[in-house]
C-alpha cells in the first residue's frame, strides 16, 4: 500500500487497509525497526496551523531490484529502489533471436555496470526480473515456444543469469510485465480487470485482475498475436496462416511499406513518416489498428476488461493506431461492455516491460530477498 499510494498518515493506512489501529501500529513498528519504512512530518502542512500529521513512507534505500527487458532487437536494463524510483538505466540494440549467449553476456555486463554506478551493493539486491517475448514456463524459467526465439531452444536464461549475477531471478512474459507496470504506475491505474496489448515486432497481451497477473493454466494466456484473422492470410512463423501478428506486427508493417516502394530502417522511421502526414504510413497504421481492434473485440467478449491499454513500439503512434483500433473494437464487440470499453494508449512507452520486471521482483518477497528483508 505504501509503495502504490504512499506516503500516508497512519489513520489513512487504517482506513484503506481495513485493519485495526492496533494491527497497523504493530506492523509499522516492525517495519520501522527494520528500517523498511520511515515516518516524518508532512512538510506540505508546515505553517498551515495546528500540528501537521506524520506521514509513513517506504525507505527507498532499504533494497533495490533489477529489471531486464529482452526484446527481439534490444535489451533494456534498469536498477530501481524499493519505491520503484529508477536509479540507473541503459538500452542496447542486439540481434536477440539467434544469439542467446551474446545477449546474456551483454545483459550481465550492463547490469554489473549499472549496479556499480548506482551504488547498490549486492547485499541490497532483492533480485532480478527478466521479460522475454513469448510464453514462459515459470517453473523452469524457459521460453514455452521455440517459434518466438528459435535460437534459444534448450537455453535456460533464468539459470544462466542466476549463475552469472549470483542473485535470484524471475522470468516472465514481456506483455505480462507491461500489464503489471501500466496497472501499477501508468494508464491502467484504478482498473480492476486490465488488458495490456503490446504491439511491437509481434503482438501480445497481458492481463491484470485485481492487481494480480492472470497467466492461464500453462502460462500462455494473452498470445493474441497468434489468433487467426484470415485463414488465407500469410504463413506465420508459428505455422498457421493469417495470424494477427502477420497483419499488424511491426515487421509486417515495414514489409508493407517496402512493397509500396518505401524502405524504412525501423518503427521510429515509420512513426516519423506517419506524423509528417505520409499517406501510406498512416494507412498501414490505421489498418493495423483495425486488425488489432477485431482481436480486442474478441478479448472483450471473453474477459470483459474495464480498460485496454495499448503499448509497445507501435503504441507510440497514439491515435493514428489507437483511434482505428478503438473504433473497430467497439463496432465488433457484441457485449454491452464492448460498446463503452475504455481503450487508451500506454503512458510508460518502451519502459513499461522493464519497469514491470522490477515491480515483479519487489512484489515477490517470499521467493526473492526474504533473507535480506528479514535481516533488516
Image (cartoon, rainbow, N blue to C red):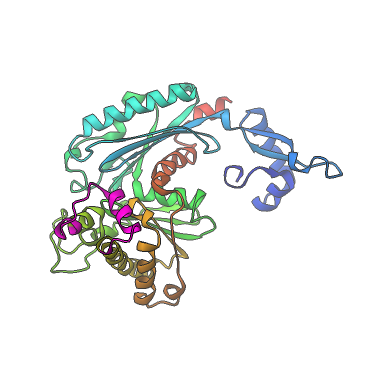
Q: Is residue 296 above or below residue 61?
A: below
Task: Give residue 108's position: percent from left, percent from top.
Answer: 33, 27
- Up the image or down, 298 lies above or below 208; here it is below
Question: 363 or 90: nearer the eye?
Answer: 90
| Image coords of residue 209 (percent x, y) | 46, 57
Q: Residue furthest right?
A: 50
Query: Does 278 appear in magenta?
Result: yes
Q: Residue, x 38% and y 24% (percent of image)?
A: 112
Highlighted magenta segment, given as a residue range: 256-279
> What residue appears at the point 38 percent right and 50 percent down from the top-left corner?
176
Q: Is 318 above or below relative to 32?
A: below
Q: Is residue 34 visible?
A: yes
Indicate left or right for 87 with 279 as reference.
right
- Determine whether, in the image, residue 265 is placed left or right of residue 165: left
Residue at the (44%, 77%) spot, across then down: 336
Considering the image in quadrants, where does the C terminus appear? top right
Q: Locate residue 252, reporting x and y percent.
A: 20, 56
In the image, is 312 to the left or to the right of 364? left
Where is residue 241? Give x, y as percent.
Answer: 15, 63
Q: Is residue 171 magenta?
A: no
Give the quadrant of residue 297.
bottom left
Can residue 42 be seen in this snapshot? no
Q: Quadrant of residue 7?
A: top right
Q: Which residue is depicted at the point 32% across and 61% down?
A: 277
Amino acid at each position: 500500500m505504501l509503495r502504490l499510494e504512499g506516503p500516508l498518515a497512519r489513520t489513512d493506512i487504517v482506513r484503506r487497509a481495513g485493519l485495526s489501529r492496533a494491527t497497523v501500529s504493530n506492523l509499522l513498528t516492525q517495519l520501522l525497526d527494520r528500517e523498511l519504512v520511515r515516518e516524518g512530518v508532512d512538510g506540505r502542512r508546515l505553517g498551515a496551523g495546528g500540528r501537521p500529521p506524520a506521514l509513513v513512507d517506504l525507505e527507498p534505500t532499504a533494497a533495490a531490484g533489477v529489471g531486464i527487458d529482452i526484446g527481439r532487437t534490444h535489451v533494456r536494463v534498469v536498477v530501481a529502489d524499493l519505491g520503484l524510483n529508477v536509479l540507473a538505466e541503459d538500452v542496447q540494440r542486439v540481434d536477440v533471436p539467434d544469439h542467446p549467449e551474446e545477449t546474456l553476456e551483454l545483459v550481465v555486463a550492463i547490469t554489473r555496470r549499472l549496479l556499480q554506478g548506482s551504488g547498490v551493493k549486492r547485499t541490497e539486491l532483492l533480485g532480478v526480473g527478466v521479460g522475454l517475448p513469448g510464453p514462459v514456463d515459470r517453473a523452469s524459467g524457459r521460453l514455452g515456444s521455440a517459434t518466438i526465439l528459435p535460437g534459444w531452444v534448450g537455453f535456460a536464461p533464468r539459470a544462466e543469469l542466476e549463475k552469472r549475477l549470483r542473485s535470484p531471478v524471475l522470468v516472465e512474459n514481456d506483455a505480462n510485465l507491461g500489464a503489471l507496470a501500466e496497472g501499477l504506475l501508468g494508464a491502467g491505474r484504478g482498473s480492476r480487470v486490465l488488458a495490456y496489448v503490446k504491439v511491437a515486432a509481434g503482438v501480445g497481451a497481458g492481463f491484470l485482475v485485481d492487481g494480480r497477473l492472470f497467466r492461464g493454466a500453462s502460462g500462455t494466456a494473452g498470445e493474441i498475436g497468434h489468433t487467426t484473422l484470415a485463414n488465407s492470410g500469410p504463413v506465420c512463423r508459428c505455422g498457421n496462416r493469417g495470424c494477427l501478428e502477420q497483419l499488424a506486427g511491426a515487421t509486417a508493417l515495414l514489409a508493407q511499406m517496402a512493397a509500396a516502394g518505401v524502405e524504412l530502417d525501423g518503427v521510429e522511421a515509420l512513426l516519423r513518416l506517419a506524423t509528417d502526414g505520409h499517406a501510406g504510413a498512416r494507412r498501414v497504421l490505421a489498418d493495423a489498428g483495425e486488425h488489432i481492434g477485431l482481436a480486442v473485440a474478441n478479448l472483450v467478449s471473453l474477459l470483459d476488461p474495464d480498460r485496454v491499454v495499448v503499448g509497445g513500439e507501435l503504441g507510440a503512434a497514439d491515435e493514428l493506431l489507437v483511434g482505428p483500433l478503438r473504433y473497430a473494437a467497439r463496432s465488433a464487440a457484441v457485449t454491452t461492455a464492448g460498446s463503452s470499453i475504455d481503450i487508451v494508449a500506454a503512458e510508460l512507452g518502451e519502459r513499461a516491460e522493464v519497469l514491470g520486471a522490477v515491480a515483479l521482483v519487489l512484489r515477490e518477497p517470499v521467493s526473492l530477498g526474504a533473507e535480506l528483508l528479514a535481516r533488516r
